[in-house]
Image (spheres, helix red, strand yellow):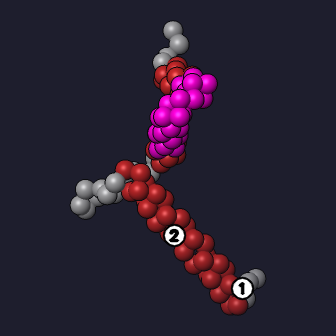
Amino acid sequence: MQTHDDIEVLRQELRSATDVIARQGEILTEVVNALRGSPPAGTQWSHHDAGELARDAQRKLTSIIRKIEISYAMDRCDDDTVDRLTREETESVEARHAARTPVP
């Protein structure tokens, strides 16, 4: 049989776990809002696609950085780097397209 002290320890652990879960929910909401923008008044965005939103943002950022690198290499007349970066960008776009195209 559990004592009053044991029950109180369990209650404290439960409160602590509940606080952690609530904070994780708040963090996830902040992340989704950062990726999507503020939701309409009185609503919240769903969290179901947060991972895909983050991956999409990362892909877009990588593409932007690559385009800046290409532009910089072009300004320096560095044709080898321009060719390499352009090829990498093309391969990346083709891979994303292939991943979205269903195989018959």
| Residue that appears at 62% across and 81% down | 11
The residue to which callout 1 is attached is 6
Q: Position of residue 97 (x, y in %)?
A: 48, 22
At numbered mark 1, what does the secondary structure look like: helix, strand or loop? helix
Work out whether residue 85 or residue 56 is closer to the camera in this orientation and state it.
85
| Residue that appears at 60% across and 72% down | 17
**Measured along the vertical axis of the image, is residue 100 above or below residue 27?**
above
Res. 2 in view: yes
Q: Position of residue 79 (x, y in %)?
A: 57, 24
Callout 2, which amino acid? Arg
Q: Earlier in the sequence, mark 1 or mark 2?
A: 1
Q: Which residues are magenta?
A: 57-86
Callout 1, which amino acid? Asp
The residue to which callout 2 is attached is 23
Q: From the viewer's perspective, tell me whether residue 32 is left or right of residue 6.
A: left
**Measured along the vertical axis of the image, is residue 12 above or below residue 80?**
below
- Foreground disc of the pair 1, 2: 2
**Quadrant of res 12:** bottom right
